[in-house]
Amino acid sequence: MESKSEQNEEWSSGVWAHLAAVRRQSPLVQCITNFVSMDLVANTLLSAGASPAMVHSVVEVPDFTPHIHALCVNVGTLTPDWLPSMKAAAELASKLGKPWVLDPAAVSCSGFRLNACLELVGFEPTVIKGNGSEIIALSSASPGQTKGADSSHESTDAIEAAKSLSLSSGAVVAVSGAVDIVTDGKQVIGVHNGTKMMQKITATGCSLAGLIAAFLAIDPLKPLEATVSAMSIFGIAGELGEAMAKGPASLRMHLIDSLYGLDETTVLNRVNITRFG
Ligand SMILES: Nc1ncnc2c1ncn2[C@@H]1O[C@H](COP(=O)(O)OP(=O)(O)OP(=O)(O)O)[C@@H](O)[C@H]1O
Ligand SMILES: Cc1ncsc1CCO
Ligand SMILES: [Mg+2]
């Protein structure tokens, strides 16, 4: 049986290899994301070495989506006129075998949003990334209590919901929080990187979903590993950023700078990943 630190060492080299591949290959990531998050998602992707494109219109999907390497769909500010482009892009990405991420942001806000997310799950996302409350609501297909975009659950409260959603949808399910949880329905991995203050910057979860899409683009056959790597890298950037920050606004800036400047030694030293169960 491998020790915890041996397991962590194995993960670390994979995490660095994934970031290096994103920087080398600069995958094109189409993002249909909410108004709050567009800027931070795009800047996160650029700092990681990927190429973001916020292409939203349904009329552009047939021309553009065939050229992308991955797609991220986020329903955070959903209105009825946005849903057709999300569905069209998701359907085409799936048909063309391109990885895509669904972020069911604030899914509990309304029946409209919950139904939209359930429809999008039908287009077979590669990864579903939400916070604890979002994953619990989507997994049970019932809204429960809502705090809007914020979570009222710990990510670890959502482990069973995440496993069940993964088995029913075929997607890898990622739950962000103090410990980021990633599961394919069988394995459950915990990523312990990150810092509490990241919750105080709006759209860090949305940016993480975009980053996961970039990591899927460079390792599409290993969605669990690519997702774990993206979560660890984003968390490490947050940890380094916090050391320079005075509060959330400067953490936002330092997080982006830290992501841009990450080197191999820092990544290998800071990755903190364990298996659950
Ligand atoms: N208590 C915590 N300790 C460490 N890291 C945290 C903590 N809470 C959140 N994070 C990190 O913050 C990032 C965003 O996660 P969070 O769960 O807040 O997303 P979210 O609710 O979807 O955010 P948003 O909807 O604003 O985009 C993740 O990288 C996560 O690991
Ligand atoms: C604050 C907020 N409201 C809808 S989406 C969003 C960004 C974080 O999900
Ligand atoms: Mg979110």
Image (spheres, grey):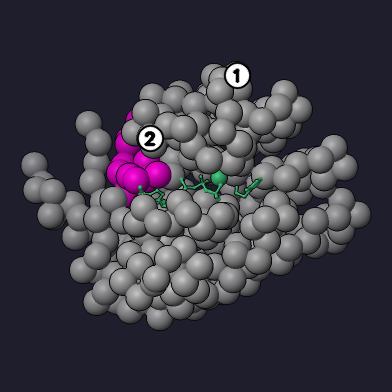
Q: Quadrant of the N terminus?
A: top left
Question: Can you tell which mark lies on residue 142?
Answer: 1
> Residue shown at 80%/56% (left/top)?
56
For marks 2 and 1, give the CA distance.
18 Å
| Residue 220 seen from this side | no
Residue 203 is left or right of residue 232, and the answer is: right
Please identify the quarter of the rendering in which residue 188 is found.
top left
**Image coords of residue 183 (percent x, y):** 39, 37
- Whole-percent x, y for residue 18 in the image: 41, 65
Q: Amino acid at mark 1?
A: Ser
Asked if marks 2 and 1 touch (Cβ < 8 Å), the reply is no
Residues drawn in magenta: 177-191
x then y, percent, for residue 100: 61, 49
Q: Is residue 4 magenta?
A: no
User: x%, y% of residue 177?
Assistant: 40, 44
Classify mark 2: residues with Cα within 10 Å, few (<14), some (14-19) or many (20+): some
Q: Identify the residue under disc 2.
A: 154
Residue farthest right in this picture: 59
